[in-house]
Image: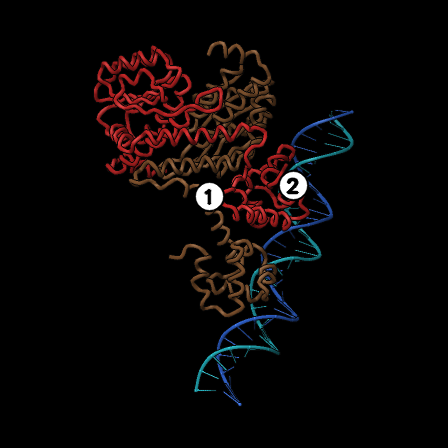
Chain colours: A brown, B red, C blue, D cyan
DNA sequence: CAAAATACGTAACATACGATACAGCGCTCC
DNA sequence: GGAGCGCTGTATCGTATGTTACGTATTTTG
């Protein structure tokens, strides 16, 4: 079974003429970067002419050069998505149903945070910590509990935190209270809910700053969002996983708390007296 | 010090107009693959026009699109050379707030699952999947969202799943409906809530099977519980983390779903028709 | 050793790609 | 409420890129 272009080349390099073999070796030497550049660059790097490069990729079975490049990119994307860490954690012994789930979840988290800079999180935390306006939280069918979780924590450390629950008509009425000083935190992963999108759009029109928690395919709400957090959700299960987003939420909760502590908010000191 | 394009984007995304921000978010979401494709593909993926993409890369400081792509490729090449250091986000320098939190959370999960056998999870899943009785879920002040999350999923794949919300007096009344064929899933971590403990005790007296999600110091409810899941909750934050319990919950949801599928439950087949 | 077949590069070609000019629109600030 | 500015998309343009045709060089084969 040949699953990568590198293997394909290794398989057929024996049957190639000299110049094409040079091309193959050049590609393998700095795999796969040269293949992503132009034919001209590839050809000069290999010291052959451009038609030779094209004949080379044709021999590998590709219709044209762009198709070859797409294939390389797909391979690269797949490689980047499955972190090397997988090899560090010994594969589960019993082949049970548990480990794959855990492994995938851990990977998702690492990936999610890899795409999330400290600065981004700090910005969002700062926005949530500055108490000029109100904070609203809402989620979709399965993600609303995450909104509740976050709301439950934020409400302890600052005033004017509201979780939008119940029927769509309920929250729509709350739009009246929202303005450009306010923040709306939305959780929305596939399949994206129309009602949430509509709501986000209206809030956006009112100038509300939207912080969106979504999956890597980005809810349409990203269009209106000031900040977007794209979490990985794929796991070997019938359901998508919200675990990565959950951890981001917890991280944000912690950051906001620390921020408010640093600001010396009286409320925090009072709260600590209660702990 | 900015060393990657991803950081550069995170740094400047705040100063960008809306459409360019969409471009930035799209790129970050599937970093860096989209950036290696053509302007046209990038623009349609982001839902903006191609000039916007070009303005976006210009704002990042690149003279033209090819230069931007080369830069991405160089970055990618550097990453591929040292797979171990594949850090998109370098460890935060200034005693960052993110990495320790993530690391601790990941550790918590590993630890939690290390103390959790496949058999234990399988038993619980089997108990939840056998639909002889009803399933009730409830949680504490901060963990109730986890109960909701689990309830939202289980309710899709089987009947008679109830999340107990609202005031204490509300659920107490539901005790009447509970019997020895029923299951009660409780989430309770420090500080353990008296109301929950009382409720668990009464349910236990009625013969209800209790599945307890708690922390490693075990809620007093463990005394009445048929199954206890002890998750690690310590993180470098002012709050405890429920992330490990969340992942266990998701794992269980997946296991129950699989179980029901294996049982050939009609409901599951019908559900899949809707997906 | 001759003749044919294959390999390879040069040069011309067509297309698709990135770049630019411009107009419409919404927003902000007097 | 009006003027100005900035943002964004449409349409157009030049060009770099992949592609192809063809002629020369090299190897292979009878």
Determine if marks 2 and 1 fall on one subunit. Answer: no
Whole-Å distance between the Cαs marked 2 and 1? 25 Å
Apparent side of residue B207 relative to residue A75 in the rendered image (left or right): left
Read off the chain for label 2.
Answer: B
Judge whether B236 appears above or below B38 on screen. above
Residue at coordinates 54% horizontally, 11% vertically from top-left?
A: A269
Residue at coordinates 58% horizontally, 26% vertically from top-left?
A: A209
Apparent side of residue C8 relative to residue A83 in the rendered image (left or right): right
Apparent side of residue A56 relative to residue B216 in the rendered image (left or right): right
* Residue, disc 1: A81
* Rendered-image quadrant of the N terminus of chain A: bottom left
Q: Dot 2: what SS?
A: loop
Task: Estimate how packed mark 1 is, as few (under 14), some (14 to 19) or many (20 or more) residues with alpha carbons within 10 Å.
Answer: few
Taking depth in this image into account, of A81 and B79 the one nearest to the observer is B79
Taking depth in this image into account, of C19 and A259 the one nearest to the observer is A259
The spot of residue B124 in percent (x, y) is 27, 28
Read off the chain for label 1.
Answer: A
Q: Is residue A116 visible?
A: yes
Q: Kindly identify which numbered label has been placed on residue B245.
A: none
Residue at coordinates 51% horizontally, 64% vertically from top-left?
A: A56
Judge whether A196 appears above or below B165 on screen. below
Residue at coordinates 29% horizontally, 15% vertically from top-left?
A: B200
Q: Dot 1: what SS?
A: helix
The spot of residue A32 in percent (x, y) is 52, 54
Judge whether B179 appears above or below B12 on screen. above
Q: Is residue B274 visible?
A: no
The spot of residue D1 in percent (x, y) is 73, 25
* Residue, disc 2: B60
Q: Quadrant of residue B206?
A: top left
Taking depth in this image into account, of A161 and B79 the one nearest to the observer is B79
Task: Estimate how packed mark 2 is, as few (under 14), some (14 to 19) or many (20 or more) residues with alpha carbons within 10 Å.
Answer: some
Taking depth in this image into account, of D13 and A15 the one nearest to the observer is A15
């Amino acid at each position: 079974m040949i699953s990568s272009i590198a293997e394909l080349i290794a398989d057929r390099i024996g049957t190639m003429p000299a110049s094409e073999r040079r091309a193959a070796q050049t590609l393998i030497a700095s795999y796969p970067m040269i293949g992503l550049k132009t034919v001209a660059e590839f050809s000069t790097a290999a010291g052959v002419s451009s038609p030779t490069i094209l004949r080379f990729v044709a021999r590998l079975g590709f219709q044209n050069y762009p198709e070859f490049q797409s294939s390389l990119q797909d391979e690269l994307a797949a490689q980047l998505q499955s972190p090397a860490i997988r090899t560090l954690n010994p594969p589960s012994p019993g082949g049970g149903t548990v480990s794959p789930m855990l492994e995938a979840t851990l990977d998702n988290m690492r990936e999610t945070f890899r795409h999330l800079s400290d600065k981004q999180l700090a910005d969002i935390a700062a926005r949530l910590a500055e108490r000029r306006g109100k904070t609203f939280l809402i989620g979709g069918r399965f993600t609303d509990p995450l909104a509740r979780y976050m709301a439950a924590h934020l409400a302890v450390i600052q005033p004017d935190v509201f979780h939008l629950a119940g029927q769509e008509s309920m929250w729509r009425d709350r739009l009246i209270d929202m303005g450009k000083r306010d923040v709306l935190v939305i959780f929305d992963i596939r399949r994206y809910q129309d009602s949430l999108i509509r709501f986000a759009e209206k809030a956006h029109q009112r100038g509300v700053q939207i912080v969106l928690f979504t999956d890597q395919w980005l809810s349409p709400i990203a269009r209106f969002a000031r900040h977007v957090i794209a979490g990985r959700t794929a796991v070997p299960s019938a359901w998508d996983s919200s675990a990565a987003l959950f951890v981001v939420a917890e991280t944000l909760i912690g950051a906001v708390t620390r921020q408010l502590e640093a600001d010396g908010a009286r409320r925090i000191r009072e709260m600590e007296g209660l702990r």
